[in-house]
Amino acid sequence: MAIRKEEIPARRCRLPALNHPISFVGAGPGAPDLLTLRAADRIRRAEVLIWTDSLVCPDIAALANDDCLRIRTSRLTLEEVIPQLIQHQKAGLQVVRLHDGDTALYSAINEQICALNDENIPVEVVPGVSAYQAAAAGLGSELTIPGLVQTIVLSRAGGRTGVPECEQLHHLASLRASLCLYLSARHVEEVQATLLEHYPAETPVAVGHRVSWPDQLLEIVPLNKMAEFTDQHELIRTTLYVISPALSKASKRSRLYSPDHDHLFRPKR
């Protein structure tokens, strides 16, 4: 006798959880169009977006799908963030941990990745444009000028968390390189005093606040006015200083395109 279709008992098919890596994504300095293609792709595919809402531009978080679960981390501790990452990844969901700036700089991804490694959870890291790059671009400047400065240093003032002794600001300033200081606005008077021991008072300093955001502040002031400018504009957070003789727009020609400089692709004639 033929068995009617409705008499066949339904079977539930249990799919195994997918082992998607958690994507740690650098959001860049703020402007959505400064995201890398890979970063934008990961955000749009995210099913869970755990994002640094105190620092990341909301327009970037808005790139995620409407049905994406968004979790803000500004009020959370590491001990509260890690279980969220683990729970949603083990449920087979695509999890994106969205940080401001570039993942390689002051992003605090290391302790998160170590905790995920302990749980054998795979991760991928997607870099972002850093604020110092966006600031230099916004000013139409190069930070390495032949015969003037060839080194860029990325650092910060010691502050509450400190820096290793060998990385104290007076050591770094003695190089007189293009010095990019993050997380330093609260200590600007001390920073300026230290820098003036090594750089001339008229050295150009780019002061960038919320670089590439709609309300960006990006101006060049002389080093001896750096603290005054900061106080005048009440800058505390999301502020970057770029101290560099390269910002003087000195006309120095690179040998790369000089007619008397031969190389692999332009041999001597």
Image (cartoon, rainbow, N blue to C red):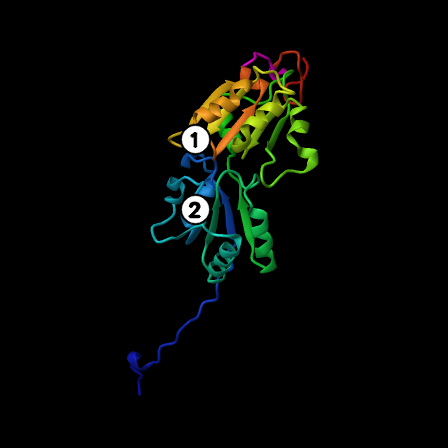
In what element is the residue under mark 1? loop
Q: Quadrant of the N terminus?
A: bottom left
158 shown above or below 114: above
Q: Residue 10: x, y in percent?
A: 35, 77
Tell me the residue that label 2 is attached to: 43
Quarter of the view holding residue 177:
top right
Q: Residue 173: x, y in percent?
A: 64, 25
Q: Are marks 1 and 2 in contact (CB under 8 Å)?
A: no
Tell me the residue that label 1 is attached to: 212
Q: Residue 41: x, y in percent?
A: 44, 45
Q: Is residue 133 left or right of residue 169?
A: left
67 shown above or below 131: below
Q: Quadrant of the C terminus?
A: top right
Residue type at numbered disc 1 = Ser
Note whether residue 206 is visible. no
Q: Callout 1: few (<14), some (14-19), or many (20+) C-alpha neighbours within 10 Å?
A: many
Bounds of the magenta segment: 249-257
Q: How many marks?
A: 2
Q: Is residue 45 left or right of residue 150?
A: left
Note whether residue 193 is visible. yes
In the image shown, does 132 or 14 lie closer to the viewer? Answer: 132
243 shown above or below 114: above
